[in-house]
Image (spheres, helix red, strand yellow):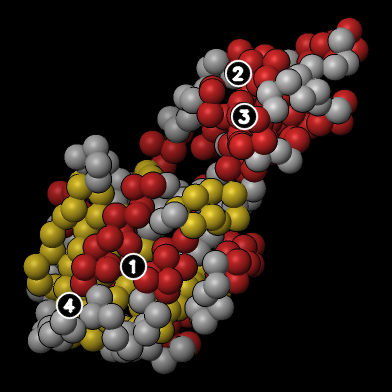
Amino acid sequence: MENRALTLLTSRPHFSALETFRKGRAFLHGVPNPDVEAKVLLLLATGMSEAEFLASPERELRREEARRFWKTVDERLAGMPLAYITGKKEFWSRIFRVGPGVFIPRPESELIVEKALEIATGGEETIVDIGTGSGNLAVALAAELPGARVIATDISARALKIARKNAASNGQDRIEFAAGSGFSPLRSLGLEGACDLIVSNPPYVSESDWEGLAPEVKSHEPKRALVGGRTGLEFIRRLVRGAPAFLRPGGHLIIEIGEGQVDAGLSLFDDRWTRPCVAADLRGIPRVVIAAKAGLSRPKSP
């Protein structure tokens, strides 16, 4: 692909933006949305806005712009996720930085935010995001609930560095970040029995399913953020068992689960929990489990 692109540049150094877009789209015919991705990569390579591209499709690309474009097309064809190439991903109508070693937010995870907002009182609550990754859940909740104390944890120092940058770029500097696995950061912060809401998009892919994932995911996204153990339920089990010690009575745990895990996931909740229920994503797939710690719930503010 790259040699073909260089041949084009050598034989005919001046291509318009529209011609380059069309040629790139043809090369990207195997990706899910070649029109969208070709345009995204073209705008990235040239620094043009979409409005500028539409207004001046015949603008000739400089040689370096063309080289940058074909380099990103080559990376995309090699399986590099588009979000890693552009360095950003949209979530909850906000832009988040992402990069290799940090899990790319998925749109179905917005369901966690939706359910959290239905439960939240809007007051001075304590909300924890375990395994924050890019910080997308913590940032979205902090933005929607300005009165809440929001704490985001992750075992990855790289992820926390990016999450802090995302919090700052989205105007949410008040989010607290803590490093560590599982509930250990909460214990260090003295949050036993003090949390109103714990959310998490945990690793839930099984070892066997990992082997069958698309190369785009398997070869580029962090395995630790995806694989939850041999069955995929190991990290979820840790959350269900450990969360009651840190939740107030009536406090909620909201976690994302994988396709086909709903029955096994619900079976993990014992008599320390009440009202576990499941919410489906837009495809009708059970995606999020919501459970309350047994005890008296707080009334929601009007």
Three-letter residue code for mark 1: Val
Q: Residue 249: which numbered mark, if any?
A: none
Q: Residue at x 45, y 33 (%)?
A: 213
Q: On the image, numbered disc 2 is attached to which residue?
A: 25
Q: On the image, numbered disc 4 is attached to which residue?
A: 293
Label 2 vs 1, first from the N-terminus: 2
Q: On the image, numbered disc 1 is attached to which residue?
A: 199
231 shown above or below 39: below
Three-letter residue code for mark 3: Leu
Position in image of residue 222 (x %, y %): 55, 48
Quadrant into which the N terminus falls? top right
Residues tagged 1 and 4 counted as in contact (Cβ below 8 A): no
Residue 111 placement: quadrant: bottom left
Circle 2 SS class:
helix
Residue 285 placement: quadrant: top left
Circle 1 SS class:
strand
Q: How far separated are the C-alphas under marks 1 and 4?
A: 13 Å
